[in-house]
Image: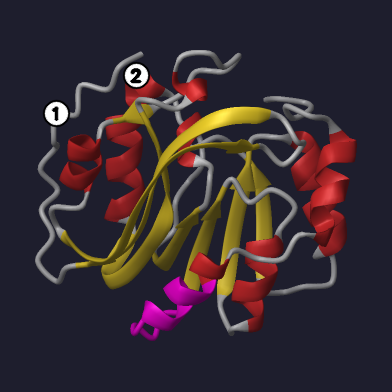
Amino acid sequence: MKKTGMFGKKFYEKTLTIKHHPRTESAVVADKTRLQKAIDCGCGTGADMAYIAQAGYQVSGFDVTFDAIEICQQRFKDSTAIKVTQASFESFTYPQTSLIIANASLFFAQPESFQQTWLKLISNLVSGGVFAGDFMGLKDDWARGHSSPITALSKAQVMMLFEDFDLLEFHERDETGETRVGVSKHWHTYSVIAIKKLTFSMQSKDLKVEK
């Protein structure tokens, strides 16, 4: 398990001042089930988890980075609504849920097992439940020049993932911008909010993810 993240503990401590993602608010509103259970994939320092818990959910969050989990454990030590685990996309045990948040995190799922990871993730999302998150596009600088394995997908591949969902929002970002630490890079991402249909097929789609 990773001891520290890309930027170290100081980076994660700085992100404590960052508010939850606006997309997370939209996802909570879109969840019309009554289950009120959520998973935050790559939870970081917990901004989205804090908001979701305040909305009345029980939240299970995971992050592969020890620093992020250590901060969350301290931040939510008195909360009975939030449980955090140090785990990867591949090792986390996904509970049944009505809301999945994966903001800027699915990039770091292992490309060779992404298809299996995705099926494991969404099979635990109840019908009518909501997915909200980002996928990395093929033109992103990190798709070819990152120190960690990156799962990068074409638009067609992303759309294939949501054949059994109703899309509420779909946004493609293709521009040069900065990371949270001020480093310039070309961003190419797809951001999605979608509701799982009542009739969902567990048939595996062959994405042929590039490694």
Horizontal and vertical percent for residue 22? 56, 69
The image position of residue 33, as x and y in percent, is 34, 83
Near mark 1 (Cα within 10 A), the count class, few <14, some 14-19 or many ≥20, is few
Helix, strand or loop under label 1: loop
Residue 33, magenta (yes or no): yes
Q: Quadrant of residue 52?
A: bottom right
Residue 69 lies in the magenta stretch = no
Coordinates of residue 97 in the picture (x, y in percent)? 41, 66
Residue 75, compared with residue 185, is above or below; it is below
What type is the residue that disc 1 sits on? Asp
The residue that appears at 83% across and 39% down in the rendered structure is 11
The disc label shown at residue 112, or none: 2
Give the percent coordinates (x, y) of residue 87. 60, 38
In the image, taking residue 89 as reference, residue 16 lies left or right, namely right
Q: Amino acid at mark 2?
A: Glu
Quarter of the view holding residue 55: bottom right
In this view, the residue in front, 102 or 119, is 102
Q: Which residues are magenta?
A: 25-36
Q: Residues within 10 Å of mark 2 (few under 14, many from 20)?
A: some
Specify how the rendered protein is coloured: secondary structure
Q: Quadrant of the C terminus?
A: top left
Q: CA distance from mark 1 to mark 2?
A: 12 Å
Q: Nearer the viewer, residue 2 or 147?
A: 147
* Above-or-below relation of 52 to 77: below
Residue at 27% x, 22% y is 209
- From the image, tell me which residue sits under label 1: 206
Residue sitting at x 65%, y 37%: 178
Query: Residue at image x 78%, y 26%?
Result: 3
